[in-house]
Image (cartoon, rainbow, N blue to C red):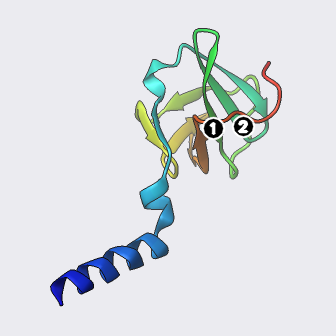
Amino acid sequence: MKKRFFILFSFSILLLSPNLIMADCLDLGRATDYSVQDNHTIIYYSGVMPLAYVTIPYCNVKSSSAIELSKTYTCDSDQIIIDGEACMISTINSHSFPGTWR
């Protein structure tokens, strides 16, 4: 009985909060440079290799923006500081990189 309850409980947590369990995280402290791709996207690099594609939907990012990490190990839903304003990261993707790199 306890085993069934545990399995059912675990499965319900997975269904109710997939972002917590499947969130992508990355150590952006390893990044040596970044570039602003568009108003809501930053690409972080380690040397010349792309490290992460970061989407910030609720803040505008310009090529002249001052960008600071609030912590080096960063996950989806963490914050990043853009021009002194805390902004939520919607997506941090380290597995596949869309589009053309600059």
Q: Could you tell me residue 88's position as x and y percent?
A: 56, 50
CB-based contact (under 8 Å), mark 2 and mark 1? yes
Q: Could you tell me residue 95's position as x and y percent?
A: 59, 36
Looking at this rendering, what residue extends furthest in the left direction?
2
- The label on residue 41 is 2
Q: Secondary structure at mark 1?
A: strand
Q: Could you tell me residue 92's position as x and y percent?
A: 58, 41
Q: Nearer the viewer, residue 32 or 26?
A: 26
90 displayed left or right of 60: left
Q: Is residue 26 above or below residue 19?
A: above
Write down the quadrant of residue 12 in the picture: bottom left
85 displayed left or right of 59: left
Q: Residue type at mark 2?
A: Thr
Residue displayed at 62% across by 26% down: 66
* Category of crowding for the residue at label 1, using alpha-carbon neighbours closer than 10 angstroms: few (below 14), some (14–19), many (at least 20): many
Q: Identify residue for label 1.
A: 54
Q: Residue type at mark 1?
A: Val
User: How many numbered tags mark residues here?
Assistant: 2
93 displayed left or right of 10: right
Q: Could you tell me residue 18's position as x and y percent?
A: 49, 65
Q: Nearer the viewer, residue 5 or 92?
A: 5
Residue displayed at 69% across by 46% down: 59
Earlier-in-chain disc, 2 versus 1: 2
Q: Nearer the viewer, residue 58 or 53?
A: 53
* Category of crowding for the residue at label 2, using alpha-carbon neighbours closer than 10 angstroms: few (below 14), some (14–19), many (at least 20): many
Looking at this rendering, what residue extends furthest in the top direction?
47
Quarter containing the C terminus: top right
Q: CA distance from mark 2 to mark 1?
A: 6 Å
Looking at this rendering, what residue extends furthest in the bottom direction?
1
Q: Secondary structure at mark 2?
A: strand
